[in-house]
Amino acid sequence: MPSPLYLTLCRCTAALLATASLMLPVQAATAPPIEHFFSNARFSRPALSPNGKFLAIVVGTPGKRDALRVIDLATNKVHATASFGDADINAFQWVNDQRLIYNVTDHQQAQGEVTHNPGLYAANIDGSAMRQLAARQHQYSTGTRTGGRMLSPYTFMTSQPGLQNADSVYVQTTEFGNRDRMHTQLLLLNTVTGFWSRVKGPEHARSWLLDHEGEPRVAIAFKEQNQLIYLRQRETDEWKEIASFNAFIGGQGSIDPLAFGADGTLYVLAGKDRDTRAVHAYDTATGKLSDEPLIETTGYDFNGGLIMNKGVLQGFRFITDALSTHWIDPRMKALQAEIDQKLGDTINTITRPRRPESDWVLVEAFSDVRPRSFLLYNTASKAFRMIGNSHPEIVPEQMGRQDAVSYKARDGLTIPALLTLPAGKRSKLPMVVLVHGGPYVRGSVWGWDPTSQFLASRGYAVLEPSFRGTTGLGAKHYRAGWRQWGLAMQDDLADGAKWAIEQGIADGKRICIAGASYGGYATLMGLIKDPDLFKCGINWVGVTDISLIHNGHWSFENDTSDQYRKYGMPTLIGDVVKDAEQLKATSPLVHAARIKQPLLLAYGGADRRVPQYHGNKFYEAVKHTNPNVEWVVYPNEGHGFVLPENRIDFFTRMEKFLTRTIGQTP
């Protein structure tokens, strides 16, 4: 078992970088075009080959399909590895130093138009020996270990690439009973021949974790309300249950496996007798969890990943208010300092090749005003090579500075938030309170974001509260949001707006509330509960009645699982019978007539998370008493707008709506 690191890491990255430049630039006279924020990324997901001699990247060109390209770093030759005339390359992984596996998507189709699955393909660097491994359509032939025919359309890459030293990889294929009885089968697939074999695993398995030798050692299963963790015994090849806990609310004994060490240590995330979850060591020989954490992030649950090399912990990447990296390996610590000094005020993540045979490392750099850039750094020559920028049209000087702030809710609970201010402006601003969805997820993290920066470029301050119920901030903060839809969770948002007014940041007469999904629900409830505070609201794909999540309607089917309805929602949101009066009191649909402020509503016609019926019912209820309601439906979009033209149309509407309601700073 490794020696405890006892690291206590503070929330300091964002504060340091946000104050790095005290002389803020003045906003340009002409605001950047909307498409600069909401077009698809030009470059994404670069990855060095295991030996570090090649770089693979997905390249997007306006008007063309996204393609997979591989650069020979010794010669600068670019290989056209994979592209399609009717699809875009999506995710990929290196199989070995000469071969990649990948799937596809279609950036020219909205969710309601999609008729194909991602499929699965493999090809060599130069595009040769390409083989389709999994079908995209539902008519397919079931493969066998000797047949090599295509696998099910529900076959996907695992989150871990394995050892990347052979032609075979592990993949997952989902077998359905119904949506609550899924079973994920792990397969060992040869990417050259297409032959595969099943891996023996526990019943109800959904995901898997490979050990330092690239072999499956942990399986995560779900049965009714319980999440089960299984460990494969190397001596007997049998799977042993090592943990069981409520999958929806966690609690005593809950762990999340992170990585394996070469000495047999299983690194796990656990909340052992603490408010926040930390990294502990699980001894696979004794079955005991370490009493003290190995890694702890003060005030935050550990949220990130461990950086391993041949089963040895070299460092870890984690999120507090911003993304940070801590290196244990002294050489990597020195390299991080060297790159940080050269690049200045950006957060810089470094990725080394798995088995380096070259001097290149991959660097991803970003800040609050800079979208992600991808560079190579040569550790011998000390020189950078620029690969690409996700949004090259963005001019940092036109972006707004972002800072991590906090304020007290009316009951004394501390609410962290992100505050983005327009370039060169700091006081008496029109403001948008931007509410994250979920709601039981981590909120926004410091860094360039298209929505907040778009709003800042138009002259608005943007406040993004991590209201109670937001995860990642400890058990107390999370549990304080249980069954508080429309109640204390809602008060946290109003208290944030009032704090901004008291600080002189926001003009109290020009504050709008906006958000998607749960954020859309909170928008409507904000207009109902605090009509004097919020002068307008923007709700896209938002819940309009909690009972509709529970009971649905004959005209639609949402993708909320029966398990979540039965075991999660009564605790987290409210029991449809026992809490009927509370759910009625906090239903925007029931109280729609109370909303008199201007309102923008947008929904996707193919949304299965919050079906359009939510919006239809609310619009019908509100339009009779409120003449200032704008309504738009994107017929083929789902829970969020994936087509750039629809995103650009929606945010164009948002800009015009805000201009005529709370206006821009003169």
Image: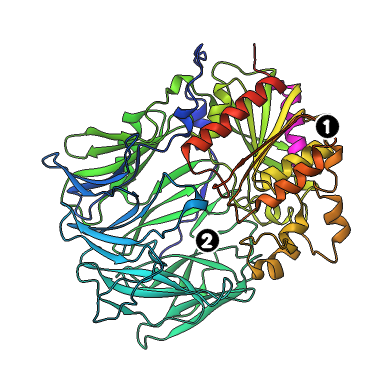
Residue 602: which quarter of the image?
A: top right
Overall secondary structure of the magenta section: helix
Residue 515: which quarter of the image?
A: top right
| Label 1 Cα crowd, 10 Å radius (few <14 / some 14-19 / many 20+) | some
- Residue farthest to the bottom? 236
- Disc 2 marks a residue whose amino acid type is Pro
- Disc 1 marks a residue whose amino acid type is Lys
Q: Which segment did they paint magenta?
A: 492-507
**In-image side of 151 versus 638 (left or right):** left
Measured as percent of width and height from the top left, residue 606 is found at: 58, 52
Measured as percent of width and height from the top left, residue 477 is found at: 69, 51
Q: Which mark is residue 90?
A: none
Q: Identify the residue shown where x is 71% and y is 42%.
A: 414
Point out the image quarter for the C terminus: top right
Q: Which mark is residue 293?
A: 2
* Residue 412 can be seen, yes or no: no
Q: Looking at the image, what colour scheme do you see?
A: rainbow
- Nearest to viewer (mark 2 / mark 1): 1
Dot 1: element? loop
**In-image side of 152 versus 94 (left or right):** right
Query: Is 502 part of what is drawn in magenta?
Result: yes
Relative to 129, residue 82 above or below: above
Relative to 590, residue 576 above or below: below
Query: Is 322 part of what is drawn in magenta?
Result: no
* Residue 657 can be seen, yes or no: yes
Mark 2 to mark 1 CA distance (whole Å)? 52 Å
Q: Identify the residue shown where x is 29% and y is 47%.
A: 85
Which residue, given by chain and number where applicable, does mark 1 sit on? Answer: 596
**In-image side of 266 versus 499 (left or right):** left
Quick one: label 2 or label 1, which is nearer the N terminus?
2
| Label 2 Cα crowd, 10 Å radius (few <14 / some 14-19 / many 20+) | many
Number of marks in the rendered image: 2
